[in-house]
Image: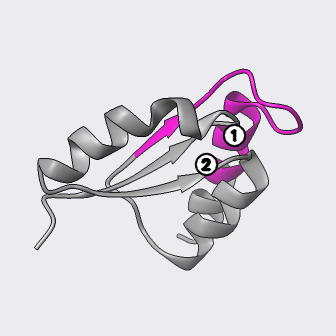
Amino acid sequence: MAQGTLLWVDDEIELLRPHIIFLEKKDYEVVTATNGQDAIDLCQERNFDLIFLDENMPGLTGLATSAQEGHRDKSDE
């Protein structure tokens, strides 16, 4: 069983592959997305223990993605 489920969102996710492999070896499940909209879609499908967001992505920035996801969480209550 994984220690936690992480979502890592970055438009250059392949550059982060060594970090992802490290976390997976530490028994974390790491799900990746390359843009903010995909991250929002993934968050609607499942829950994550931690989300890493790149601030400088084309389209939705990390902050814009976080704001939209935060709005969704409040509307679910």
Instruction: Name the residue furthest top.
Output: 56
**Residue ID at (71%, 42%):** 65
User: Is mark 1 in CB contact (under 8 Å) with mark 2?
Assistant: yes
* Circle 1 crowding by C-alpha within 10 Å: few under 14, some 14–19, many from 20: few
- Tag 2 secondary structure: helix
**Disc number for residue 70:** 2
- Residue at image mark 1: 67
Residue nearest the viewer, comparing 33 with 53 = 33
Q: Amino acid at mark 2?
A: Gly
Q: Is residue 5 left or right of residue 8?
A: left
Span of residues in magenta: 51-70
Please identify the quarter of the rendering in which residue 74 is found.
Answer: bottom right
Please name the colour scheme applied to the rendered image. one colour
**Residue ID at (65%, 33%):** 12
Question: Does the magenta portion include 34?
Answer: no
Q: Position of residue 34 (x, y in %)?
A: 68, 47
Q: CA distance from mark 1 to mark 2?
A: 5 Å
Q: Is residue 21 left or right of residue 46?
A: left
Q: Position of residue 7 (x, y in %)?
A: 46, 52
- Tag 1 secondary structure: helix
**Residue ID at (23%, 52%):** 24
